[in-house]
């Protein structure tokens, strides 16, 4: 029986010669279609050998189309973030403002004055406009944008302290995630790490005692993804700047997130701000473009003119250069902060600023529409939204979520969650107390209809409707 089923499977040749695949053979070339057909027939064989039903010829041909569609589908695919985690690294961090999107698109579409001075026709700087915005917003003497914050730090340490010692508090020799560790970055930059103090307490005298004629910098790094609580002490920027001035050692501070607005305004703990570090006299401040700044992937360095100039002259500067699309959208994003409209225009800040009452009203609206469309009763429950992206660990915003009980679905909450991921666009949610929770805070207003369609579809898949 099985042997006969295997014999009856179409040959690769037969599949490729199917009229239904003629357009694909023509477009993508016969050799590639033969390869895909071999995969599809192989899969069918495996299925039969495992005791499954043999697919028909037409099904094998359809499988070839499916394999091809997977290969040519544009990636990354847009998804809807209903997790309530605002800066979700796995979901691409910060969504861009309309203006920032348009700026990137314009830079991509045609030629631009990227490196030409239109007044003189001579070569210009790609960073000039961005640098003046960053100087105005942070109060720094000079600024530089590169590919991301990790590369900014690598560049900064390589340019200022290669072959020298860099003094770091033991509480700040951190791992940020994705294999990015301060001690490794120091080693890669050719610096020697000198760690001082203890995990929970470091004093300014610890730094002072460690200074030698080989010291190249004091480095502070914001412990952005964990919290040390209780009997702790860290050295503030001003104290360290004072010591640095006495001993001729520049202070570098990796603040991580680049919060240009005060987070305490929204009931959160205070996140270090680049402008505060500049006001304290820090030599160089490093931060990301796509965390709390709410822009594209980028690494930003602001600080003293003489130090930034050394970074610009270093050979690595070219290797970690920012691309024109990120440059354009970063400039547009910064303009929102300069114009005092970031809270309205930058999605990350709009999400942070949304009140619990506004979120609750949206969740109630979803509940009513799910009921009307499917007849299924869901609930609106209190929830906590998180900032994410290694910012403000343990800090949450009071929120509300639509709660879809897992008991409604044959597959339970996991079944609902995966059915939501299978929709177009996929919806990413989370499970709490055996229910799927969807937090409207991180769902863009234009996506409400898609979320409701996805919930309806997931309930049907699970047999609830
Ligand atoms: C996130 C983070 C980085 C890495 O920034 P990327 O822009 O992702 O390269 C570096 N340092 C700190 C403290 C961070 O929080």
Image (spheres, grey):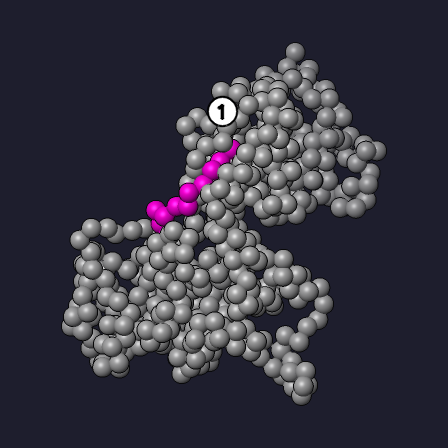
For the N terminus, the image quarter is top right
Magenta region: 392-402
Where's residue 349, x and y in %?
50, 55
Where's residue 111, x and y in %?
70, 71
Q: Secondary structure at mark 1?
A: strand
Of 461 and 20, the residue lying toward us:
461
Of 224 and 358, the residue lying toward us:
358
Task: Report which quarter residue 382 is drawn in.
Answer: top left
Where's residue 215, x and y in %?
25, 76
Where's residue 196, x and y in %?
20, 64
Q: Is residue 439 visible?
A: no
Of 105 and 181, the residue lying toward us:
105
View extreme (top): residue: 1
Viewed as shown, does residue 294 lie left or right of 104? Answer: left
Q: Residue at x 57, y 76 (%)?
A: 129
Question: Does the segment drawn in magenta span residue 288?
Answer: no
Q: Which residue is mark 1?
A: 405
Q: Is residue 33 visible?
A: yes
Q: Is residue 223 above or below residue 377?
A: below
Q: Is residue 56 above or below residue 318?
A: above
Q: Residue at x 33, y 62 (%)?
A: 221
Q: Is residue 46 above or below residue 198?
A: above
For the C terminus, the image quarter is top right
Q: Is residue 91 above or below residue 426?
A: below
View extreme (bottom): residue: 120
Viewed as shown, does residue 206 lie left or right of 123? Answer: left
Q: Residue at x 46, y 68 (%)?
A: 300
**Looking at the image, how many numbered discs can be counted on the residues?**
1
Question: Does the segment drawn in magenta span residue 401?
Answer: yes
């Amino acid at each position: 029986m099985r042997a006969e089923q295997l014999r009856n499977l179409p040959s690769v040749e037969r599949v490729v010669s199917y009229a239904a695949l003629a357009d694909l053979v023509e477009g993508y070339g016969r050799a590639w279609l033969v390869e895909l057909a071999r995969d599809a027939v192989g899969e069918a064989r495996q299925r039969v050998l495992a005791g499954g039903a043999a697919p028909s010829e037409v099904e094998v041909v359809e499988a070839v189309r499916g394999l091809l569609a997977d290969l040519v589908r544009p990636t990354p695919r847009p998804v809807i973030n209903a997790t309530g985690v605002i800066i979700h690294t796995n979901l691409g961090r910060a969504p861009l403002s309309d203006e920032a999107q348009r700026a990137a698109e314009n830079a991509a579409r045609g030629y631009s004055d990227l490196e030409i001075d239109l007044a003189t026709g001579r070569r210009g700087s790609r960073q000039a406009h961005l640098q003046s915005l960053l100087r105005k917003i942070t109060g720094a003497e000079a600024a530089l944008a590169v590919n991301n914050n990790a590369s900014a730090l690598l560049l900064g340490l390589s340019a200022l302290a290669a072959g020298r010692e860099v003094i770091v508090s033991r509480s700040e020799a951190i791992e940020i995630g994705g294999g990015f560790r301060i001690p490794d970055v120091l080693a890669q930059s050719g610096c020697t790490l000198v760690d001082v103090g203890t995990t929970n307490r470091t004093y300014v005298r610890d730094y002072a005692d460690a200074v030698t004629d080989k010291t190249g910098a004091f480095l502070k790094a914001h412990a952005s993804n964990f919290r040390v609580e209780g009997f702790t002490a860290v050295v503030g920027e001003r104290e360290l700047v004072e010591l640095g001035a006495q001993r001729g050692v520049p202070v570098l501070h990796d603040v991580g997130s680049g919060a240009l607005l005060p987070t305490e305004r929204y009931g959160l703990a205070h996140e270090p701000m680049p402008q505060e570090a500049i006001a304290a006299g820090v030599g160089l401040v490093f931060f990301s473009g796509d965390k709390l700044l709410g822009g594209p992937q980028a690494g930003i360095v602001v600080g003293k003119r003489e130090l930034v100039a050394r970074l610009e002259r270093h050979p690595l500067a070219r290797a970690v250069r920012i691309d024109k699309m990120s440059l354009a959208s970063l400039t547009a994003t910064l303009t929102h902060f300069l114009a005092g409209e970031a809270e309205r225009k930058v999605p990350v800040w709009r999400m942070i600023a949304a009140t619990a009452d506004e979120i609750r009203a949206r969740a109630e609206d979803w509940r009513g529409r799910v009921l009307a469309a499917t007849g299924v009763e869901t609930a609106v429950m209190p929830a906590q939204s998180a900032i994410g992206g290694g910012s403000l660990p343990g800090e949450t915003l009071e929120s509300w979520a639509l709660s879809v009980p897992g008991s409604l679905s044959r597959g339970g909450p996991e079944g609902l969650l995966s059915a939501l991921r299978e929709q177009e666009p996929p919806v990413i949610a989370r499970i709490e107390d055996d229910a799927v929770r969807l937090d409207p805070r991180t769902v863009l207003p234009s996506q409400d209809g898609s979320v409701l369609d996805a919930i309806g579809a997931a309930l049907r898949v699970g047999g609830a409707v």
